[in-house]
Image (spheres, helix red, strand yellow):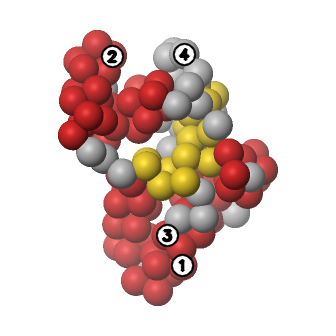
Amino acid sequence: MNIVDSLCWLEYFAGTHIGDEVAHIIEDTDHLLVPSITIYEVFKKILIELDEDKALFAIAHMKQGNVIDLDTDLAIYAAKIGKENKLPMADSIIYAVNQKYNATLWTQDKHFQDLPLVRYFEKA
């Protein structure tokens, strides 16, 4: 299973070289987990920088993967992971999904750089 973080999703939608690197991961929707917090982050960024129609289009694409909603158990697990790894809230939730499903996280976020099950890309 794979998780693509918000930064890589945005690179994908922008058509950058990092977006090209993660395209095969995103397009393999049978093996794609989408933490609901990434939907929030991507929608907000595109809404601010472009418009609501483009943001809704992006989210429709993201929802083709398996969306993982934040429930009580995941929230508690994320808090523990956040404490252990000194991660901010959204990153804690994303990494909790990563750990729960033993998935590979594809990211440009330095918070994740040295953690297990992470494929890190330097920002351009």
For label 2, the crowd category at 10 Å Cα-Cα, with few meaning under 14, some 14 to 19 and many 20 or more, is some
Give coordinates of residue 60: x percent, y percent: 53, 73
Query: In the structure shown, which secondary structural element does the residue marked by tag 2 occupy?
Result: helix
**Which quadrant of the figure has residue 94?**
top left
* Distance CA(mark 4)–CA(mark 3): 28 Å
- Disc 4 packing (10 Å; few <14; some 14–19; many ≥20): some
User: Taking 40 as reference, is 3 left or right?
Assistant: right
Q: Position of residue 51 (x, y in %)?
A: 42, 83
User: Sequence-wise, which precedes: disc 4 or disc 1?
Assistant: 1
Residue drawn at x 21%, y 40% is 72
Say which amino acid is labelled 1.
Answer: Phe
Mark carried by residue 85: 2
Q: Quadrant of residue 36?
A: bottom left
Residue position for label 3:
59
Earlier-in-chain disc, 3 versus 2: 3
| Mark 4 or mark 3, earlier in chain | 3
Distance between mark 3 and mark 2 Cα atoms: 29 Å
Q: Hey, what amino acid is under mark 2?
A: Asn
Tell me if residue 12 comes above or below residue 31 in the rendering: below
The amino acid on which the numbered mark 3 sits, given as a three-letter code, is Ile
Question: Quick check: 29 above or below 60?
Answer: above
Image quadrant where one finds the N terminus: top right
Give the quadrant of the C terminus. top right
Task: Tell me whether the residue at label 3 lies in contact with that at label 2, contact meaning CB atoms closer than 8 angstroms.
Answer: no
Q: Which mark is residue 103?
A: none
Q: Residues within 10 Å of mark 1 (few under 14, many from 20)?
A: few
- Residue under pointer 4: 116
Q: In front: 96, or 50?
A: 96
- Residue 2 at least partly seen: yes
In the structure shown, which secondary structural element does the residue marked by tag 4 occupy? Answer: loop
* Residue 57 numbered tag: 1
